[in-house]
Structures are given as structure tokens and as C-alpha cells.
Amino acid sequence: MSNPPSQIMTPHPYPGKLIIVEGIDGSGKSTQLLLLHKWLESKGYKVFFTEWNSSELVKDTTKRGKKNKSLTPTTFSLLHATDFASRLYHEILPPLKAGMIVLADRYVYTAFARDVVRGVSPEWIRKLYSFAIIPDMAFYYRVPIETAISRVLGGTRGQFKYYEAGMDMNLHPDVTESFRLFQSRILDQYDKIVDEFQLMPMDATKDIEAQQNDMRRLVGEALKDYKPRRGTHGRRTVFWRRFDVSKSE
Amino acid sequence: MVDAQYFGDGLTYLNPSDLKGKLIAIEGTDGVGRSTHIEMLQEWLEVQGYGVVTTGWTRSNLMSKTIEMAKEGNILDRWSFSLLYATDFADRLEHEIIPALRSGFIVLADRYIYTALARDFVRSGNRQWARDVFGFALVPDLVCYMRIDIETLVLRVIETKGMNFWESGMDLRLGSDLYDSFKKYQSLLIEEFDKMAEEFHFEVIDARKSPDEIQDALRSKIQPLLTANLRSPSLPSDRLIHPA
């Protein structure tokens, strides 16, 4: 416990850039990241996108555990950490090493906020993810709970999912009320995390275009000295391809 | 488990103070005969009237299939390798081990977190992270470590089930073939188990001996736990010798 938790993760030494977004469900963070993705690609950058809880390794297990409601706060947390570890190794590190821009929808801060609300120890969860690397840019989309609720209900999804509403915590029998209580607690945790890990707070109540302009301006500034890797058909790629083949045999 | 304790940062939502049973972990490298001896111990305890629950590494409802699949695909990196086992262990701890201990059962665990700690250390050279991850584990009442030397182990494994990819640590590329790799990998594991045996006060059982001798040694380590805290299995008539 000699290190403050914020110093447990290490910065990465790779030529690529890691940009992540955080925020509760209905904060609009995924929309903003999608628009950023389009913009970066239009500028000619090589971009790789990765999303929370999407790895082949544990996706089905998490789904099964959620379905039969057998997940405890600790197994819930560990499954997501396994997912993250697998994606870090297979999806995040290789493109960063190759000099690409990696966009991540949710990062370890999601676990720090959500799993602590579910009841795991804040110290434990930070140590669990200490193998993660510090992102180059981390945006936090801050939104009042009522705005988030009306966005989720009025949006494409139209309803709350069981775990997203924290129904496993028996906070309230009504799903909307449960969502309100659960996500409000997550908002409180995020507020602490923003200070602890210096996330960039973004006003998620603004118009989509206005938010995207802010984001593009900030990312543009941060990428001023970034030299994108071009020439994917250059000699280097051929070398690695050959190397790969001999190794897997 | 009168003063049940967590290994590190525990389950904050679960107070371990009311666990009446006993948690006994049987540790040791692959092929050392753990499961056979656990079966015999269960029989021995049940005959004496103790309720026994056994729990085995990777046998959780949640994770056993996932771990098998991951191993088949050889898609494991160091972190998810340890985290898959941690998830399996957490599922069994909360759904099997703790409920059984609360009801007063003796829980015999075929492998415990020390297996994961040794495997992670051999892969990473770092002890801290895996110990932090498994902080939610209960400290067992007793850890019996079935110790064997590598030469005896190699012969025994070849005679019985043979060597497999993961037990040989082939993901680590320690040797040019299965045999060399198995020997190096298991030697490293034994070395780490030996260190942990001192640090965590394992009871060391010489697993090179005959099955009967090993079983006797295990029983003699377990016996003192039984008389200490569980209700004595002796007949109630004993108490009638000196009526009030």
C-alpha cells in the first residue's frame, strides 16, 4: 500500500495512442467515440476500436452467468478483468506497438466505479487492474441521472437491462427506480475517480455536435506531435508477417 | 474456522466470522496423487460422522467449460490465465466453500490458491499481483503439501496419464519438447511450492512414499483439527460416566 492507487498503472512506451471514454449508460460516450473514429479515419489515421466486455474468451460465460443470475460481485468483477486482460493483450497492445490509435469504449475506470458500488473493495479492484496501462487521453462524459434515464428510455434500446439497472442489488423492485439509484451511486464513484486519475470531464448535456467539436479540438491538440505510421505495405510489415508464420509452426 | 481470515482484501460484503466447519487444502504439483488421497480422506472422515464437501480446481459451474475452451485454443496470456482461475475459485468459494463451512462441513479442497500463485510466479517472476488478486480467499485451517522430487514425478506421470501441454508449461517454451519442458516447468513449480511451504506454514507430506504411508501422514495432520473444534463424534453415552 505504499503507492497511491493512481500510480499503480504504468504509462506505455509504445508509438501508438490510447484514447478512452468513460461515463454511465446514457451519457452518450459511445456516440462521441464513434464520431471521433470517423473523423480520425477521414484524416488518414490507422484506428483500432475496442469495447468493454467483448472478448471471445469470456463473453459467453458472462452472458450465461448474467442469465442464470449466479454472478456475485467478485465473480462479476473477475470476469470483466479477464475480458480486459484478454483484450489488452490481443487488441490494445499490438496496435499501440504498431503505432496505431486505439479507441476504447470504457476502460478500467468502469470497473473502479461499478464494481465498488456492487460491493468489492476499492483497494482490491485497483490492484486487480494494476497490469493496465495509463491511457494517453481519458474522457469522462458527465451527465445528470435524469438525462441518462430519458436517453436510455427514449433511445434505440427503449428499456433497461437487468444488470445495467443494478437489479441484482435489490435496491428497488421497479427497474427504472433501481437504475436511478444504482447509476447515481456510480456517478458518485466516477466523481472521485475523475480527481484520482485525472480524467477529462466533458459536459454530456450539450448538443452532440458541440460535444464532438470539443472532443476533436482536444484530440487534435494531443496528436500534434504524433507521427502516424503509414505504408502498411512497406518492408517492415513483410518482415513481421514472415516472422509470424515461422513462429506459429 | 473460529477466527476465519481473508488472505488479503476480502469480500467486504461477506463476514467470515460464523464459519463453523474446517477448510483443508491439499496442494502439490500435477500427478502427485492428490485426488486419490482426497477420496480416501473423505471416506475416513465420513465413517467418523463428519460431513464432508470436496471442491476441485477449475470445477466451478461458471468457469469449467470456459477454462477448457481457453486451454484448447491456447489463447491465454499471463493475466487472463490467472484471472480465469481466480474467477473459478471465487465462484466455488462463494457458492460451495463458504456455504459448506457455514453449515459445519469439512471442506477438502483439491488444490488451493497456492497452485495459482506458483503458476503465476513461474510465468511472471512477480509474486505481488497474483497475491493481491486472490486476496479474497479464506486462509485454510490446514494446508497439506504433497511434496515430490522431479525425478520421481517424471516417472510416475509417464507411467500413468502421460504429459500434457499445460502441465508441461508448453506456453512458456521452456524446453524443446514435452519431456524437457515438463521437467523444467514442474521443477520451477516445486521450487516455488517449497518456498511457500515455509512462508505459509504448510504441513509437508512426503509423496514419494507408499499410498498407505501418505494417507496415514495426511490423517495424522488432520486429526488434531477434528478434536479441537468440531463436536466430538464420540457417543453421547461417554458423558454419562460421571452423572451430575
Image (cartoon, grey):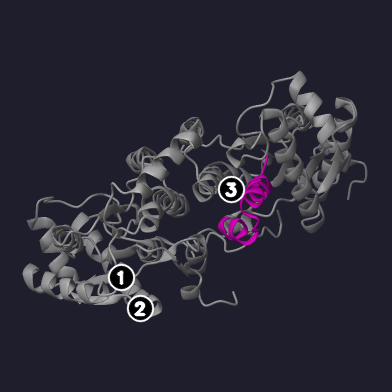
Q: Crowdedness of circle 2 by 10 Å Cα count: few (<14), some, many (20+)?
A: some
| Amino acid type indicated by mark 1 | Ala
- Residue type at tag 3: Ile
Q: Quadrant of residue B241?
A: top right
Q: Which mark, by number, is residue B92? A: none
B165 relative to A149 in the view: left or right: right
Which span of residues is magenta-colored? B111-133
Q: Is residue B50 above or below residue A229?
A: above
Disc 3 is placed on an element classified as helix
Position of the N terminus of chain A by quadrant? bottom right
- What is the number of the mark on residue A198? 2
Find numbered disc 2 in the image and state the secondary structure of the residue it sits on.
Answer: loop
User: Which residue does the image show at 71% across and 57% down from the upper left?
Assistant: B2
Q: CA distance from mark 1 to mark 2?
A: 8 Å
Find numbered disc 1 in the image and state the secondary structure of the residue it sits on. Answer: strand
Which mark, by number, is residue B98? 3
Residue at the image position 18 percent from the left and 65 percent from the top: A27
Callout 1 and callout 2 share a chain: yes
State which chain disc 2 sits on.
A
Nearer the observer, B170 or B101: B170
Q: Is residue B13 magenta?
A: no
| Horizontal and vertical percent position of residue B140 | 70, 51
